[in-house]
Structures are given as C-alpha cells and as structure tokens.
Amino acid sequence: MVVRLFRRLYPYLEAHFEVGFYVYLWVNGSVLAALVGRPWLGAIGLVTVAPFVVAYVVRHRRHPR
Amino acid sequence: MPLSTIRILYELGIALLFLVVAARSWRTRGGAVTVRELVFGFVLSQSVELLAVQCGRYRYPDWLVYFPPHPAWVPLGVGLGWAALVPVVMRISERILGEDAPPWRLGALDGLMAVGVDLVLDPAVSGEPLRMWLWRGEGMTPYRFWLLDVPVFNFVGWVLLVGACTWQLRVVERAGPAAPKWRRLAVFLAVDLAVAVIVMRLPWW
C-alpha cells in the first residue's frame, strides 16, 4: 500500500520537489515542536510558511511548466 | 521519545536531507551548478557560524560531528543544513517570480522564505529542552531583543545571509559561461565575511 501510494505521488514529488521539501521542513519543525512540548509553534508556519506555498501554487496554476 | 534520541535523529536527518537535495539538484541542473551552489552555501554559512560562535553569539553543545573537528565549535550538520536550504528556496522563488526576475528580488524572497521556516524550527530546537544550540551562557552575548525565545539577531541574520548568498550565486551564474565563477564567488565570500565580522560586533543586537 505504501509503495502504491508512493508511486501515485511520485510524479508530483518529482515536479514539485522543492516546495514539497519546504513544506516537509515546516512539518518536521512542527513535529519537533510538539515533541518538546510546544505544539503551538507549528501554527506559526500558517503565517510564515504557508503564504509562500500558496504563492507557488497560484503561480503554477497560472503558468504551469 | 528520549531527547538524546531526537537530537541524534535531527543531526542524521540533516545529513540525509543534504544528500537528497544534492542528488536532486545534480540530476536536474547538472554537476557544475550544483557543486557551486552547495559548496558556496556550505563554506559561507559554516564560516559565518564559526565567527558567530567565536564572538559568543551562541554555541552548539554535544553534537556528533563538528567541522572542523578542532576547535569543535560548529557541527558539520549546520553547514549542510544551510547548503541544502539554498537551492530549495532558490528554485521556489524562481517559480514564483520567474527565472528572469532581478537577482535582488529573488534573493529577498529567498531570505524571507528561509526565515519563514526558521521561525518554526529555531524556537523548537534551540534552548531548552532540546539544546541543539544555546543562546544564553557565561561569556555569551546578552541579547536585548527576543522573539519566541530566540534573539531577533538570528532571524535578521537568516534573511541577510540567505538573501546575500543566493543573490551572489545568481549574479555569478548569469555572468556567462566564460566568467571566472569560482574566483567571483571567492571575492563575494571575502566581502560577506568582512560584513559578518562588523555586524556581529555591533553592540546593539
């Protein structure tokens, strides 16, 4: 099941590796924050990370490569 | 999960992420550009980190691998982490603003994106309880301005360092195939380190 999911996701990961990596850093930081007892830190990314991701998605939809 | 295990996984994770980014960049952009971006990102960040630790800005206790090993001031993973982040934010901002956008605009966006993710990461891993790096201690800089229990100096540094690094890389790459790219990067590195020395000695941070 994991392999099948990965195969389905792979084209997207391949096409959008960098923004996926950027979101991963946010998720990773949020998990670490939760592990050390500061789960609210992850929500900061809604203001500091998410706008860049949204800008990327909007730009990609207007000008797909 | 014990904190010591989280620390080890964090350090190993950075090295793994660096390898993933390096492989991806090599495959999509070629070896020469990849090596320039990663080497310049690593050397610049590791050098600035060494300066910062020497100036008492922060310290990195109890990591597995330091570079250089003596004095054991800055972990290898710190430079690798910076170097991995550089091509990632560069490619995202090029997709947002367009590859032909002015380097200073792209660099500014790179710096803002880098500090955006650092605002989540840094407060989680620095200071207590994880102690990947410490801002307070005997003989260290008494910071005046703090945000999320991290000195504002750190976030300003992220914007400036990442922005300058990516702006310089783009200026060099756009200079044409015949330009002496490594020599120009070396000049940029020298200028960056001189600026970093001045900024770190400013008393009002």
Image (cartoon, coloured by chain):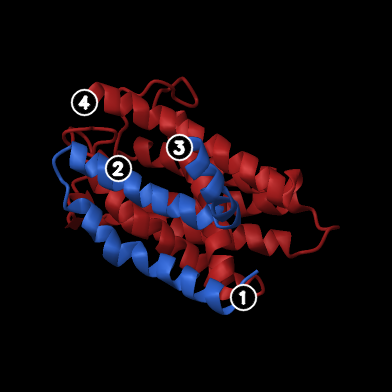
Chain colours: A blue, B red
Residue B57: which disc?
A: 2
Q: Confirm or deny contact between disc 1 and disc 2 (CB under 8 A).
A: no
Q: Nearer the viewer, mark 1 or mark 2?
A: 1
Residue A1: which disc?
A: 3
The amino acid at mark 1 is Ala
Q: Earlier in the sequence, mark 1 or mark 2?
A: 2
The amino acid at mark 4 is Met
Chain hosting mark 2: B
* Same-chain status of marks 3 and 2: no
Q: Nearer the viewer, mark 1 or mark 4?
A: 4
Residue B1: which disc?
A: 4
Residue B86 position within the rendered picture, expressed as x and y whole percent measured from the top left: 53, 52
Label 2: state its secondary structure: loop
Residue at 49% x, 57% y is A19
Label 4: state its secondary structure: loop
Image position of B8 with respect to A16: above or below: above
Label 1: state its secondary structure: loop
